[in-house]
Image (spheres, rainbow, N blue to C red):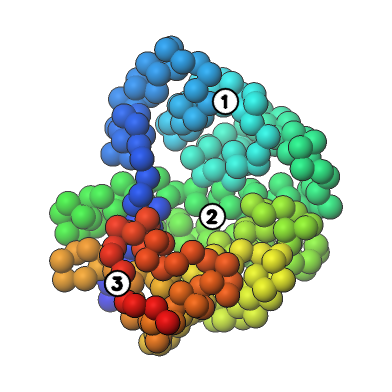
Amino acid sequence: MIMKKIVVFFIMLSYSLFGQQENKGDRLRSEGRLDEAIKAYKEIYQKNPNNQDNTYNLACAYAIQYKKDSAFHYLNVALNKDNSLWALADNDLYALTSDKRWKMIERQQLEKYQKQNGNVQKPKYVLKLLRLIMKDQALDYQLDMAKQYFMRNGKAPHWYYPIAQMKKEIGNGNFNIMEKLILENGWPTYSSVGKLAADSPLLIINHHQDEAVRIKYLPQIKKACINKEGSCLEYAKIQDRILVNTGKKQLFGMQFRYNDKRKLEPFPIEKPEYVDKRRKEIGLEPLKEYLKRKINYTWSVEQK
């Protein structure tokens, strides 16, 4: 049972690894070779300091190493012309949140975002939700290193277990904070807090250990999707996870497993010939495109 849980956990970590094009620095960072990654990023920075993505990734690599001064230096450079809130939810930067300089990053990004997109109804709520997203995924880099070890050796490294336990404790703490925030501020919607912040409870609920939590909140998540006030992608993931975990066939093809060849494939799907129809109804791309992009899987069931 323990090994089964480890395998399932590593499958979840695998979802974002497929279909990404990496430069040398990204590849080295994904392999855990942070010093070499920083060197590669800095070589690009010296040639092209206006490469915003490279500079941002350089800041992230420094942050993962807890080299805060260097991380803040390059982060400020990278965010100079960035009007998004993404950095405020990026788990790679979690080490910086305990530094007083992080408050300034939060303030300046929120100001730039509102200048471009209009004022959000609840700015303080936005920042709290984004912090939850960041904390929810704070150990994902370290857990991805454990996943790579597992894939090479067929067993989890000894240091996986304390990190996984910390991840569980963080998840439980985040869930309690999330419920309190929702009680005080209401369910976050696209129109009240923006798309990124509105996804915060969905991520926390999906990562919770207790299936009853997902079942409890599924109607609210589905309602937000239908009303175009929440993520239909996350709704589909949560709906399918509930079905798979309760021994039923999934509806949207969002949950994966390893087959005998140690390749990812979707869990069985209810009436698979109609899966694209169901996905289209909530604004999702055809399953064939999704699976090819996410796990490099060829879906060949003819659709009706």
Quadrant location of residue 4? bottom left
- Check disc 2 and give the amino acid type: Asp
Q: Quick one: label 2, few (<14), some, or many (20+) residues within 10 Å?
A: many
Residue 136, disc:
2
The image shows residue 158, relative to residue 99, as above or below, that is below
Give the x, y percent position of residue 283. Answer: 57, 67
Nearest to N terminus: mark 3 or mark 2: 2
- Check disc 3 and give the amino acid type: Ser
Give the x, y percent position of residue 30. Answer: 33, 40
Q: Is residue 63 left or right of residue 88?
A: left
In what quadrant of the picture does the N terminus appear? Answer: bottom left
- Check disc 1 and give the amino acid type: Ala
| Residue 265 seen from this side | yes
Q: What is the CA distance from the residue labelled 1 to the residue labelled 2?
A: 24 Å
The furthest residue to the top: 46
Residue where numbered disc 3 is placed: 300
Nearest to N terminus: mark 3 or mark 1: 1
Residue where numbered disc 1 is placed: 78
Q: Quick one: label 3, few (<14), some, or many (20+) residues within 10 Å?
A: few
